[in-house]
Amino acid sequence: MHRLGLISCHRAKYKPTPSQQKIEERPNLLNQDFNPTNLNPKWVTDITYIQTKKDGWCYLSTILDLHSRMIIGYSFGKRWILVWC
């Protein structure tokens, strides 16, 4: 590796630290009922962190309609911004 001018890359492992702020509890509005009878009464969302070589950490956020199981909104980028479909 030295003759070819190559070096190895080492990254420190991610170690989460607990937050000092009190977490605000929210009521459970769905009550495990994930089968609505018509469109748009219940939406769910999720944020996924994706590590890329070019841009580092990126974020994918989606909004899903529970009745049709279709993605109705998404965002992908280095910052979290919602884009409607």
Image: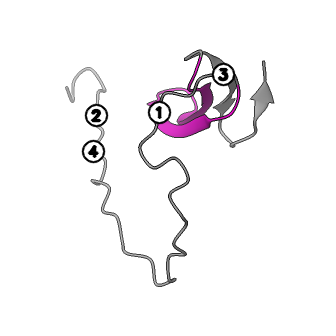
How far apart, in angstroms, are the residues tagged by discs 1 and 2? 51 Å
Q: Looking at the image, which residue is at 45% across and 34% down?
A: 51
Mark 3 packing: few (<14 Cα in 10 Å), some, or many (20+)?
few
State the extent of the magenta-drawn residues as a range: 40-67
Mark 4 against mark 2, which lies toward the viewer?
Answer: 4
Q: Nearer the viewer, residue 55 or 77?
A: 77
Q: Nearer the viewer, residue 55 or 75?
A: 75
The dot on residue 34 is 1
Amino acid of disc 4 = His
Mark 1 against mark 4, which lies toward the viewer?
Answer: 1
> Which of the 4 image quadrants contains residue 24?
bottom right
User: Which secondary structure lies at badge 4?
Assistant: loop
> Which of the 4 image quadrants contains residue 79?
top right
User: Which secondary structure lies at badge 2?
Assistant: loop
Mark 1 packing: few (<14 Cα in 10 Å), some, or many (20+)?
few
User: Which secondary structure lies at badge 3?
Assistant: loop
Residue occupied by mark 2: 7
